[in-house]
């Protein structure tokens, strides 16, 4: 059983297929896009060792010749060095514009392989086979591709839409509980930013999603993808409404930069803490009822995700460097900070020109030094 969500982008429209058993049928599903029957698969060592054979078998069955490019797992791979490595391997393999890149992994592999696809020979097609909950509900859809730099998250990148996304729920069976929770942070984000009914459903069914109950998981992934597809189709390049998908990210990306993009703080964990901070800041500014902020924070905490500065990273954060990172955020304009804030549960809005002093004071009140 699978559901297909269409991302309606005119000549760049594509399907996101969500369901079980997709990996074993990947050859058939990918064949229409592999014009010359040749693909390069970018994956990480962990995913490749667990699921690489299944993908190779499926591609072989459809007469598709595949060459793997396997990178180390983890956020540090989404870097200049990682990008250089992938591009060099693509050149060695002599991939041409009629060939295809398959991103097979979590958001790190998807963002890196997608960016390589955007710039290799000025752009070749790619397909996403996301293998983490986070990648299935978020990073594989919408065409944001990027690498990190010491100055900030995703500061070097491109919009490059995939031709197809295959979200096979079965591959999540090997994912760690911590990574499931990190992905869940982006799921709950959709409820918080724009769908109160989904938020309430998650309050009631979040534990089932995290326990990988097949029906709950299928609904949570499909509803998240549906929301993202609808927003991306309306505002592909983040001229307006798409920025709502950044709820929790202005705080979250600054926390990630301060902790050095590592195992200490996963992206989803940073988004969880960032979403809680965004709701509490909204309440503190009188923009959102404090009961709503408390309920948002309780739902995040109930899934075992961090909601306070003290719960993330390796120690005390300092307010001033965090605010400096926020100044580098892509939503900032002329030194003015932009945040996604909340009016209530299920209704976020883009707040431009947020006072940096107010953010710094708020961070101090939240326990930053
Ligand atoms: N482009 C976007 O729109 C977008 C959206 C959200 C997040 N992101 C980016 O995505 C990245 C985070 O992605 P992520 O959370 O998927 O992290 P990740 O890609 O690092 O994967 C997390 C870990 O899980 C392992 N893994 C992956 N699939 C597995 C499986 N099926 N079984 C067992 N282990 C598996 C990986 O090897 C890795 O160690 C961040 O860089 C973030 O900035 C991008
Ligand atoms: O797709 C989007 O748009 C998002 O904002 C999704 C986010 O979850 C994701 O982390 C994204 O990469 C952040 O975007 P950025 O433009 O702030 O780097
Ligand atoms: Zn994110």
Image (cartoon, rainbow, N blue to C red):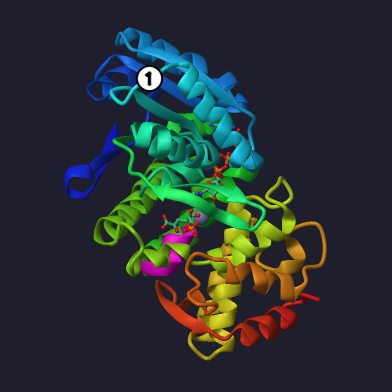
The quadrant where residue 179 appears: top right
- Per the image, the residue denoted by label 1 is 39
Q: Image height check: is 172 above or below 202?
A: above
Q: Main secondary structure of the magenta part?
A: helix
Residue 200, percent from left and from top: 43, 65
* The quadrant where residue 249 appears: bottom right
Which quarter of the image is occupied by the N terminus? Answer: top left
Quadrant of the image containing the C terminus: bottom right
Q: Is residue 21 visible?
A: no
Name the spot of residue 360 as percent of width and height, x first. Answer: 68, 81
- Picture quarter with ligand 1: top right
Count neighbours of disc 1 (C-alpha within 10 A) and say few if under 14, some if 14 to 19, many if 20 or more.
many
Q: Nearer the viewer, residue 177 or 86?
A: 86
Q: Is residue 111 magenta?
A: no
Is residue 192 shown in magenta? yes
At 77% across and 75% down in the image, what residue appears?
368
Q: Is residue 102 above or below residue 6?
A: above
Tell me: 93 left or right of 238: right
Instruction: Check the image and report above or below for 233 versus 263.
Output: below
Could you tell me which residue is drawn at 50 percent across and 86 percent down? 289
- Please provide the residue range marked out in magenta: 188-194
Front-most of residues 300 and 341? 341
């Amino acid at each position: 059983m699978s559901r297909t969500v269409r991302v309606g982008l005119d000549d760049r429209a594509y399907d996101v297929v969500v369901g079980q058993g997709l990996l074993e049928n990947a050859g058939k599903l990918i064949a229409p896009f592999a014009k010359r029957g040749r693909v390069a698969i970018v994956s990480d060592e962990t995913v490749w060792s667990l699921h690489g054979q299944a993908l190779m078998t499926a591609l072989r069955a459809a007469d598709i010749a595949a060459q793997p490019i396997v990178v180390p797992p983890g956020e540090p791979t989404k870097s200049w060095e990682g990008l250089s490595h992938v591009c060099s391997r693509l050149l060695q393999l002599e991939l041409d514009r009629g060939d295809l890149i398959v991103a097979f992994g979590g958001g790190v592999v998807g963002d890196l392989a997608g960016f390589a696809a955007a710039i290799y020979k000025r752009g070749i097609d790619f397909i996403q086979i996301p293998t983490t909950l986070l990648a299935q509900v978020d990073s594989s859809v919408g065409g944001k591709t990027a690498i990190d730099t010491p100055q900030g998250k995703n500061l070097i990148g491109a919009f490059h839409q995939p031709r197809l996304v295959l979200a096979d729920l079965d591959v999540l069976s090997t994912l760690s509980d911590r990574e499931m929770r990190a992905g869940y942070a982006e799921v709950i984000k959709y409820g918080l930013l724009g769908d109160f009914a989904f938020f309430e459903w998650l309050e009631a069914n979040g534990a089932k999603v995290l326990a990988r109950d097949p029906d709950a998981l299928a609904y949570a992934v499909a509803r998240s993808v549906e929301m993202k597809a609808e927003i991306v189709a309306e505002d592909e390049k983040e001229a307006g409404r798409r920025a709502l998908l950044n709820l929790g990210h202005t705080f979250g990306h600054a926390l990630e930069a301060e902790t050095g993009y590592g195992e200490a703080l996963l992206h989803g964990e940073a988004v969880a803490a960032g979403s809680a901070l965004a709701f509490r800041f909204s309440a503190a500014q009188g923009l959102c009822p404090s009961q709503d902020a408390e309920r948002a924070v309780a739902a995040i905490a109930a899934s075992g995700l961090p909601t306070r500065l003290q719960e993330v990273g390796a120690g005390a954060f300092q307010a001033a460097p965090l605010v400096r990172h926020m100044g580098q955020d892509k939503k900032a304009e002329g030194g003015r900070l932009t945040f996604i804030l909340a009016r209530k549960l299920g209704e976020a809005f883009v707040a431009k020109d947020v006072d940096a002093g107010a953010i710094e004071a708020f961070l101090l009140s939240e326990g930053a030094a």
